[in-house]
Image (cartoon, rainbow, N blue to C red):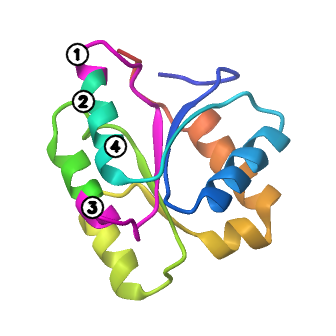
Amino acid sequence: MEQGDESLRILLIDDNHDHARILQWAFKKTGRKDEFTYFDDGSSALQYLKTTDSGGNIRPDLIFLDLNLPRLDGREVLRLLKSEEGTKGIPVIIVSSSEREEDVRKAYELGASSYVSKSSILDDVNPVLQTIQAYWGSAAKLPLRK
């Protein structure tokens, strides 16, 4: 789907409510009207996504996923997202406080579309998010919404 000026539907999965609020605030501050659905754990987010296949919810265009989640780790959430027919085509951006090489490598091996350090977003919010929005909101061609 070509996004152009159309808003993105973003699923945000992060157990840190403050980080989630900052990310949502920062996106709104750039002037876009992107829609967020937020979950603080991977299990609830996966359950929500299952209902998109049955017509109950609208599938997101993009997923922001923290790696260090309680109960169901973000790596496992990513693995499950990329193994399911209904979700494997949704781009997943890892937003993590970890900058360890093994975490970055594993995320890409599991199918992440991008890996962004939380510190780069929280320290310098506008330029990083504007780059993300410009790429995923305008430059990248996303599949049509179902």
Q: Position of residue 47 (x, y in %)?
A: 27, 36
Measure the alpha-carbon separation of dots 4 and 2.
10 Å
Q: Where in the figure is residue 85, as x and y percent of width and height?
A: 16, 34
Q: Categorize mark 4 by other alpha carbons within 10 Å: few (<14), some (14-19), many (20+).
A: some
Query: What is the CA distance from the residue labelled 1 to the residue labelled 3?
Result: 23 Å
> For the residue carrying disc 1, how many other residues have a C-alpha within 10 Å: few (<14), some (14-19), or many (20+)?
few
**Upstream in sequence: badge 4 or badge 3:** 4
Dividing the picture into quarters, in which one does residue 75 lie? Answer: bottom left
Q: Regarding mark 4 in the picture, which secondary structure is present there?
A: helix
Q: Residues within 10 Å of mark 2 (few under 14, many from 20)?
A: some
Task: Look at mark 2 in the image and give the residue it sits on.
Answer: 50
Q: Nearer the viewer, residue 119 or 22?
A: 22
Q: Specify which label sits upstream in the sequence, 4 or 2.
A: 4
Please tell me whether mark 1 or mark 3 is closer to you in this view: 3
The question of residue 56 being in magenta is answered with: yes
Q: Which mark is residue 72?
A: 3
Q: Quadrant of residue 68?
A: bottom left
Bounds of the magenta segment: 52-76
**Residue 54 — which label?**
1
Position of 4 relative to 27 (above/below): above
- Height in image: 107 above or below 7? below
Q: Residues within 10 Å of mark 3 (few under 14, many from 20)?
A: some
Please give the name of the residue rendered at 33% of the width and 32% of the height, measured from the top-left corner: 48
User: Which residue is drawn at the image coordinates 76% and 32% (left, top)?
Assistant: 32
Q: Tell me the mark number nearer the camera, choosing from 4 and 2.
A: 4
Q: CA distance from mark 4 to mark 3?
A: 10 Å
Amino acid type at circle 3 is Leu
Circles 3 and 2: CB atoms closer than 8 Å: no
Query: Pointer 4: what residue?
Result: 44
SS for dot 2: helix
